Amino acid sequence: MGLAVFAQDGAYSAFTPYSVYGIGNMSRPGTAFNMSMGGVGVATRNRRFVNTLNPASVTARDTLSFMADFGLIGQATSYRQGELKSFNNTLNINNFVISFPIYKSSAFMIGLTPYTNVGYKFSYIEQDPDIIGHTGTLGYSANGYGSIYQLFAGGGVTLFDNLSLGAQFIYYFGNIDKTVDLIFGDSSSRSIYSGYVLQLNGTTAKLGLQYEKPISSGHTLTLGATYKFGSKIKGHVTDFAYASLSSQTDTIRNNVSSPCDNNLKFAGELGVGLSLRRAEKWSAEIDYMRSDWSGSGFDSASGFASVGVNTFSASSSQSIRAGFELTPNRNDIRYMYKRWTYRFGAYYDESYYRFNGNTVTAYGITLGMTIPVYMGYNGITVGLDFGQRGRVTDNMIRERYFGFNVGFNIFDIWFRKQRYD
């Protein structure tokens, strides 16, 4: 059911004009657990949740425990450019991941989550276009939708009781559709319909490590690091264009499909993090992520590069994320709300592209909680995200958004031998 929703045509997984270029808008990484803490996870070791951001963290678990996480994400966004304003809502599946032990201090996880999303639709009508001859009005519209997903599988092992190592295989795949229409009001002028269909895939690997150091009674310091390798973008770019006059249609380019340029690449990524926790009472973490897209080849590639008068250029992206969580009393038998886990986080992101030479930044705060359900570590995680991207100066579009995410945390014990009948 989840795959069917992921693959549906014409649905917007995200809606932002900043997804026009490159491979779209980067999805917020991690599960609801990660997102409700500002997106941290590089140095997170929590046996109650699946942490997908560092493959080394998969070993932080109870023996014989099976865990799964299924998440939904939605966002309400207001847009402003000068005096123009608009509003849009989106809702989609965010992730599905399962994790289970392999042998003693080793474990495995496999999952599916969005990597990038494309969603935009805008238009305008020019009353007196600067074109030789009488063409009447000129209508311009652009529309795009689609996603690139990442299917991952990885494992980890703990050595010497405090050093954990992990590795993850990642497969990128997905389709992106982009269309541009030029429609003349004069019936004697030919309107132009054109666009691209990007069918993309690629493979890469991610390495992770975490080192734990007890520093006092009940307190543990964890250092984490991840590195994801860059990889070539494979697949095909289909280009089409045709002109229409009344009932007659002339084909200019009819679904011309060509392999992706060998210079197109998914960028690598480096992440480092530091966390401090006190048993299962509280934890705090700060992460830094950096990814260099300047050599991705998007700047001049058909279907990826500039549209209209705006100039697009790939650059380096970076982000700083911080989060804190607190559980008042996990074993309280009198007050249910004291067993809940409360979270707070903040983040600052610089996107992997520039518009007209301007860096696109986003910042926000996150809130969340996990409500225990039934037995074990089963629970429902709810998170909120309040943020802004872009600004109203330099002819840019400012987005102010309110996002929410819900995660269903599933826990069970496998291969348990009954001692009494």
Image (cartoon, rainbow, N blue to C red):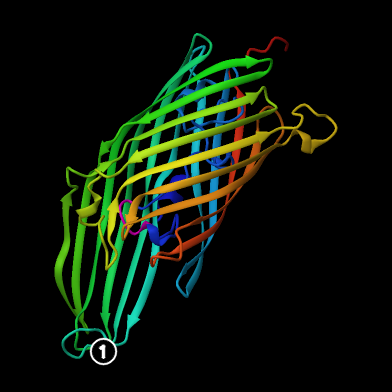
| Crowd tier of the residue under label 1, counting other residues whose Cα lies within 10 Å: few below 14, some 14–19, many 20 or above | some
Amino acid carrying label 1: it is Gly
Q: Is residue 47 above or below residue 248?
A: above
22 in the magenta segment? yes
Q: Which residue is drawn at 26% across and 57% down?
A: 197
Q: In this view, does 19 lie above or below 94?
A: below
Q: Quadrant of the C terminus?
A: top right
394 in the magenta segment? no
Q: Say whether residue 301 is visible.
A: no
Q: In this view, does 366 lie above or below 128?
A: above
Q: Position of residue 4 (x, y in %)?
A: 44, 49
Q: Label the magenta part by its dominant secondary structure.
A: loop
Q: Which of 371 and 162 is in front in this view?
A: 162
Q: Where is residue 304 in the image (x, y as percent from the top left)?
A: 26, 55
Quadrant of the image occupied by residue 3: top left
Q: Say whether residue 364 is visible.
A: yes
Q: Where is residue 116 in the image (x, y as percent from the top left)?
A: 39, 48
Q: Which of 23 and 372 is in front in this view?
A: 23
Q: Which residue is drawn at 25% across and 44% down?
A: 296
**SS of the residue under disc 1:** loop
Please state the total of marks drawn on the protein image: 1
Q: Which residue is drawn at 52% across and 20% down?
A: 59
Instruction: Identify residue for label 1.
Output: 136
Q: Position of residue 241 (x, y in %)?
A: 19, 68
The segment highlighted magenta reads 19-23
The answer to whether residue 216 is left or right of residue 17 is right
The answer to whether residue 362 is left or right of residue 352 is right
Q: Nearer the viewer, residue 193 or 140?
A: 140
Quadrant of the image occupied by residue 332: top right
